[in-house]
Amino acid sequence: MKDFVLASGSPQRKQLLAQLGTEPAVIEPADIDETPFRGEKPSAYVKRMAREKAMHVAAKYPGKVVLGSDTVVVCAAKIIQKAHSDEEQEKVMRALSGKSHHVLTAVCVVDAAGKPRVRLNTTKIQMKRLSEQEIKDYVATHEWVGCAGYKIEGRLAGLVRKMTGSYSGVVGLPLFETKNLLESAGIRQELK
């Protein structure tokens, strides 16, 4: 069902949508300022980002349903920013080693009338205590490049002791919330 716009260039989000039997008619990543506001809580930030991305793209496609999403990793109440070097990613992995953290993914669907609806999905992750060699080995894969924190669908999955919540949410698009939001906007999954 190619009758909505995806406000994201993430190949993972497109693949997850395919699991629902849906495919966007248009893919247009939202080019917006993603700087957190001073004192903004991670849950408020990720919901705002999903909404702003969807609304930014919806302004270009009036009358169309638009889906936007944003994902952050939160440890000790702080958002883990994207690393830009191996050294920065090693610091991220040391911060997550042996600790519980949360992955927050917000989904926003703007319906054909321009009304946005946002849902937040939170997943708790317990990472095993990582040795320095495990940290260096993971960082060397470069699977984390372009992601905030890590990519769970890669080699990191073998370092996760426990996950409580939505695997698809950690990948970048919680399918339960996404399906319900799309259906409320008139987008039905295709039965095969």
Image (tube, rainbow, N blue to C red):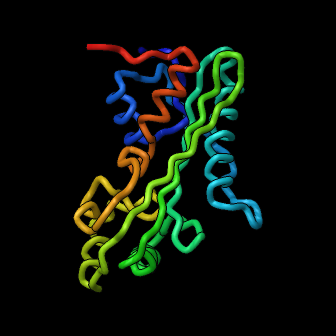
Residue furthest bottom as drawn:
132
The picture quadrant where one finds residue 191 is top left
User: Can you say whether 9 is above or below 110 in the image?
Assistant: below
Residue furthest front as drawn:
164
User: Can you say whether 43 is above or below 70 in the image?
Assistant: below
Q: How many marks?
A: 0
Residue at x 35%, y 14% (from the top left corner): 190
The picture quadrant where one finds residue 176 is top left
Residue at x 53%, y 65% (from the top left corner): 74
Query: Which percent across, then down, holds residue 133?
Result: 24, 83
The picture quadrant where one finds residue 143 is bottom left
State the residue in front, 59 or 176: 176
- Location of the N terminus (image quadrant): top left
Query: Which percent across, then down, holds residue 106?
Result: 56, 45
Query: Which percent across, then down, holds residue 81?
Result: 55, 66
Residue at x 61%, y 51% (from the top left corner): 46
User: Can you say whether 3 is above or below 81 in the image?
Assistant: above
State the residue in front, 165 or 52: 165
Residue at x 38%, y 56% (from the top left corner): 164
State the residue in front, 85 or 63: 63
Query: Which percent across, then down, holds residue 36?
Result: 69, 60
- Location of the C terminus (image quadrant): top left
